[in-house]
Amino acid sequence: MGRLRITGVELREVTYEVRDVGPDPRVAYLPVYRPGLVAERRVPVFRIFTDGGVTGEYAGGSTLEAAGARTVAGLLLGQDPLERERIYDDAKRALRQHARMGIGPLDIALWDLAGKRYGAPVFELLGGFRRELPCYASTFTGDHEGGLDSPEAYADFARRCRELGYPGFKIHPVAEGDVALDCATVLAVRAAVGDRMALMLDPACAYNTFGEAVLVGRACDEARFFWYEDPFKDGGISQFAHKKLRQLIRTPLLQAEHVRTLEPHVDFIVAEATDFVRGDPHYDGGITGVMKIAHAAEGFGLDCELHGAGPAQRHLMAAMRNSNFYELGLVHPRTGSGHAPVYADGYRDDLDSVDGNGCVAVPEGPGLGVTYDWDYIRAHTAERLTLGAVPD
């Protein structure tokens, strides 16, 4: 095989409708159940073209990552698409003032391209470890609309997820940071499912004080939770505060969703500020960046837990020994997940996507192993940016 060169890059933003889902009024990026609401969302779609006719594709992320990708997409023109390490380093430097957002989706598309080049799924290129991924059901944020609006509602939903086969369940409570309500929810869910599920809590940085975080952490201790994630209103970045919290509670912490790429993750580990290590291919430099984080965590004897659902996360987890669960979400008892309908092959990350053992499979076709619905994508494109030579 001869060398390839990148000849063009295309970035689209595709619109789609979601029903009964809207932004939380306090934290706009968190989805919440809003019965009767019909809202428009956007998903970025990326394509990388080469002079050898091999194309890398990826649909995923948010408009924030798309904005960062626009900044660095031009760096790819003329490059060898298989030299992902060099492209990663160049983009990381170029985006150092922009939280390094935007590397991820382009890197994922490059891995898709590499898999198609060699006729192999991405997880095999990474070094496969497994093909079935145990899942936890990751809920919407709590609401006040008759959905996840009480400890009993969360408990009922956890029982339903257990019946579907899920081995784990993660609570995203109401965005207000209601300590008494959250403690009651933690205890109610454990009482509902017994010891048959791993349980997690993610308040999404809601609590105002260290004391509040400790109180909820002690409820997690009593309920034997698997992890406790992002409690503080620091935005999840204070190494000192999380180290202190670890000294006062028994429940393991999962941190580093809100720091970007390898080095700050390692700093969190060395500071003893987390037990599990978070990695996200959209936020942390794509598949290339997350594998660096996973291997660094492995070197310290820690597990790397992936944030969010999607083909990239499935391939990553399939190639990682030190990871416990695939985050299937966000899910809710009364509405769908709100994921974009951009697949032509039936790929889904919905509540009922798991098998009887609570697992999802890894796509096994070349690259990411998914087929995109380009008729739908073209018909619903709101914005399109092209660089270099891109087919119409």
Image (cartoon, helix red, strand yellow):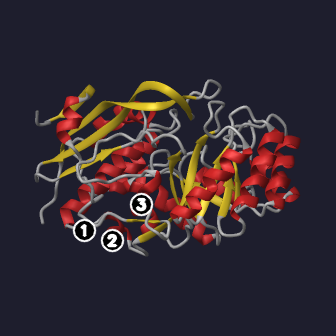
Residue occupied by mark 1: 120
Q: Residues within 10 Å of mark 2 (few under 14, many from 20)?
A: some
Identity of the residue drawn at 19% across and 67% down = 119
Q: Is 243 positioned to the left or the right of 347 in the image? A: right
Q: Is 99 positioned to the left or the right of 188 in the image? A: left
**Residue 315 in view (yes/no):** yes
Q: Residues within 10 Å of mark 1 (few under 14, many from 20)?
A: some
Discs 1/3, front: 3
24, above or below 163, in the image: above
* Cα distance between the residues tagged 3 and 2: 12 Å
95, above or below 301, in the image: above
* Cα distance between the residues tagged 2 and 1: 7 Å
Identity of the residue drawn at 23% across and 36% down = 377
Residue 391's disc is none
Residue 124's disc is 2
| Residue type at tag 1 | Ala
Secondary structure of the residue carrying numbered label 3: helix
The quarter of the rendered structure image containing the N terminus is: bottom left
103, above or below 20, in the image: below
| Residue type at tag 2 | Glu
- Count how many numbered circles sit on residues in the image: 3
Q: x, y (%) of residue 2?
A: 12, 62
